[in-house]
Image: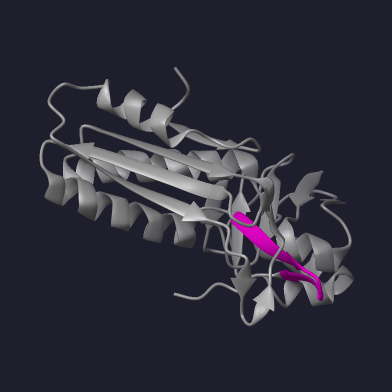
Amino acid sequence: MIKVLFFGPVAERAGAREAGVEFHAGMRVQDVRTKLQGLYPAAFEMVCFAAVNGEHVRDMSLPLADNSEVVFMSRYSGG
Amino acid sequence: MKAAVRIQQEDFSQDEEIRALQTSSKRIGGIATFLGCARDFSEGREVSEISFDAYGSMAVSEMNKLREEAIEKFGLLEARIVHRIGVVKAGESIVFIAAGAEHRAPALQACHWLIDELKQRVPIWKKEITPQGDAWVTPHP
């Protein structure tokens, strides 16, 4: 299972802070994004960044391991 | 002593942070600081408080990377970064950065660089709470 987390404005639009996506061999970040974008289209309009296991990911074709933590994020506004 | 890089709900003491930095090395000749505060007015609206959300583990990891990069890039002797999360009332402190170096120029430059990079790289989001309703802040340069 891939654990997906949402924060801030993305979480508010999604109406959830967490989602699960069933893992399959060869799964990539883009596969998770495509699946969740269909479920939470308004939230994904804001998504600019992704992270896997706490590290920024720019290549959406990055392969995922089972039990990975994936986060889709809007632009940051801290400070 | 508290960690040099933290996110926390409670307020922080600038004096404690500066003292911790100052006592880390007797070679420090200059300390520059930045304090970010919650304004009570934004985009033409009154703001009563700001609510911060964060991807906590990644935020701390990125802030630690920033600290290490700043120490390397500017030749700092020490640096500290503290960011609050949760609800911060107008007029209260949000973020504190302190950079210590042998001379003032690198300390000042590092402090400026650290707050700019923090805004770009650390997964924290702010929502302004106003009498007219709540609104997530859209980042601007």
Residue B23, placed above or below residue B41: above
Residue located at (44% from left, 54% from top): B118
> Which segment is the magenta one?
B124-135
Q: Nearer the viewer, residue A67 or B104?
A: B104
Verify whether residue B129 appears in magenta. Answer: yes
Q: Is residue A27 visible?
A: yes
Q: Is residue A38 left or right of residue B64?
A: right
Residue B19, placed above or below residue B107: above
Question: Looking at this rendering, what residue extends furthest in the top direction?
Answer: B1
Q: Is residue A33 left or right of residue B81?
A: right
Residue located at (30% from left, 57% from top): B112
Q: Position of residue B90 (x, y in %)?
A: 64, 57
Q: Is residue A31 visible?
A: no
Figure coloring: one colour
**Quadrant assignment for the N terminus of chain B:** top left
Q: Position of residue A40 (x, y in %)?
A: 85, 70
Q: Is residue B63 left or right of residue B20?
A: right
Verify whether residue B40 appears in magenta. Answer: no
Q: Main secondary structure of the magenta part?
A: strand
